[in-house]
Amino acid sequence: MTRFQPGERVRIRDDYPPGHIRTPVYLRGKSGVVERYFGAFGNPEVLAYNLKGPKKDLYKIRFQASDVWPDYQGSPKDVIEADIYEHWLERLP
């Protein structure tokens, strides 16, 4: 069973570690909804250094554009979808 389920609200960890990071800076600290679970894959943050490590669960997360950019002037229906690894996700109440 996966840690997060489709429809669950999550927040992207607001962290800025050094190294090869695949999570977009503009999404850190933002909240979204789990759309889909893709499976477990090698962690690109480790693979970038030709190292091996445990596989990490990968999810598609949907964000309202206005939640990502408060000054967003487009349609309130506009969304952003991003593939985010589990170790970047925090459960929301």
Image (tube, rainbow, N blue to C red):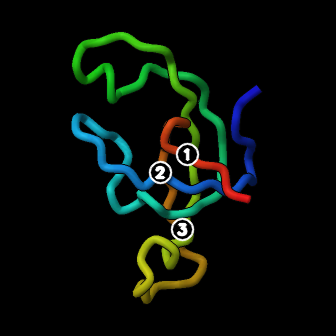
In this rendered view, identify the residue nearer to me: 15 or 1.
15
Q: Which residue is mark 2?
A: 13
44 is higher (above) or lower (below) than 30? above
The earlier-in-sequence mark between 3 and 2 is 2
Residue at x-position 41% and y-position 77%: 69
Marks 1 and 3 close (CB-CB < 8 Å): no
Q: Which residue is mark 3?
A: 79
Q: Secondary structure at mark 3?
A: strand
60 is higher (above) or lower (below) than 3? below
Task: State the CA–CA distance, disc 3 to disc 2.
Answer: 19 Å
Q: Which residue is mark 1?
A: 89
Residue at x-position 29% and y-position 42%: 17
Q: Secondary structure at mark 2?
A: loop
Pinpoint residue 37: horizontal percent, then vertical percent.
Answer: 65, 36
Task: State the CA–CA distance, disc 1 to disc 3.
Answer: 18 Å
Marks 2 and 1 close (CB-CB < 8 Å): yes
Neighbour tally class for label 3: few under 14, some 14-19, many 20 plus, Cα within 10 Å: some
Pinpoint residue 81: horizontal percent, then vertical percent.
Answer: 51, 56
The amino acid beneath tag 1 is Leu
Q: Write down the quadrant of residue 57 in the picture.
A: top right
